[in-house]
Amino acid sequence: DGGITQSPKYLFRKEGQNVTLSCEQNLNHDAMYWYRQDPGQGLRLIYYSQIVNDFQKGDIAEGYSVSREKKESFPLTVTSAQKNPTAFYLCASSILVGSPNSNQPQHFGDGTRLSIL
Amino acid sequence: DQQVKQNSPSLSVQEGRISILNCDYTNSMFDYFLWYKKYPAEGPTFLISISSIKDKNEDGRFTVFLNKSAKHLSLHIVPSQPGDSAVYFCAAAGTSYGKLTFGQGTILTVHP
């Protein structure tokens, strides 16, 4: 089945440590996204990528970094500079808007919950 | 600045009745709107969408209404079922790169 796989489901970070969240998709989607969800809040965009080797900052990119070396993969690194990293992180993908099938919905993985030790 | 707002944090409905979830937006550049459903510890699942050239879109028990002049959209679920109990997010897009802006979510509880 095609879909988006996020791993691990739960992750713990020590103070001063960088951690990387994995996101893989086999939907052949060009665009991929990372969101953060905090209790009582909507999803906020961290980074997005429309094409391999290119990505842009979203609304809350500080303290995060990404890479897009392959179409299928869009890992997110939560750096020690992110002072409040405890949250639920969601990865999504979609057909690239502007293509013949524009305005397609984003499809989400099941998320990774990051906590601080 | 919250560009997409869901002002009702929660909604409780009896099984078989209609559920109406509301969403307001402020950015007039938004031209595509979506509703997602989310269960705890899972990712959101796409439900239904509407383009700004329409004022209604229907898919089975789910209907989305868009009032552009009021910058308001709503999701109607008829009839409501206990399995519909979840958090519902509205989202809006208005640029060519597909960036979505989400509301805070509304917790829907459907009682048997």
Image (cartoon, coloured by chain):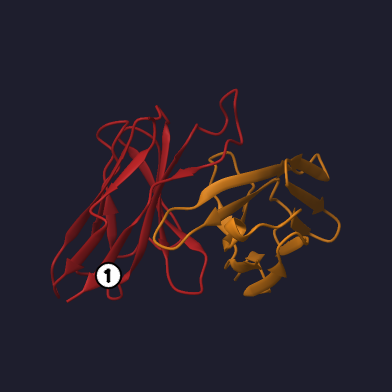
Please say whether residue B89 is visible from this viewpoint.
no
Q: Residue at x 50, y 32 (%)?
A: A96
Q: x%, y% of residue A114?
A: 27, 66
**Left or right: where does residue A102 sit relative to residue A36?**
right
Q: x%, y% of residue B13?
A: 71, 69
**Left or right: where does residue A100 sit relative to residue A89?**
right
Residue sticking out furthest to the front: B112
Q: x%, y% of residue B27?
A: 70, 58
**Left or right: where does residue A70 sit relative to residue B51?**
left
Q: Nearer the viewer, residue B109 or A104?
A: B109
Disc 1: which residue: A82
Please say whether residue B19 is visible from this viewpoint.
yes
Q: Classify A63 as above or below A98.
A: below
Q: Classify A116 as above or below B33.
A: below
Q: Amino acid at mark 1?
A: Gln
Q: x%, y% of residue B58?
A: 76, 41
Q: Residues within 10 Å of mark 1 (few under 14, many from 20)?
A: some
Residue A31's image quarter?
top left
Q: Residue at x 51, y 57 (%)?
A: B38
Quadrant containing the N terminus of chain A is top left
Q: What colour is chain B?
A: orange
Residue A99's image quarter?
top right
What is the chain letter for disc 1?
A
Residue A69's image quarter?
top left
Chain with colour red in the figure:
A
Q: Classify B54 as above or below A98.
A: below
* Local secondary structure at mark 1: loop
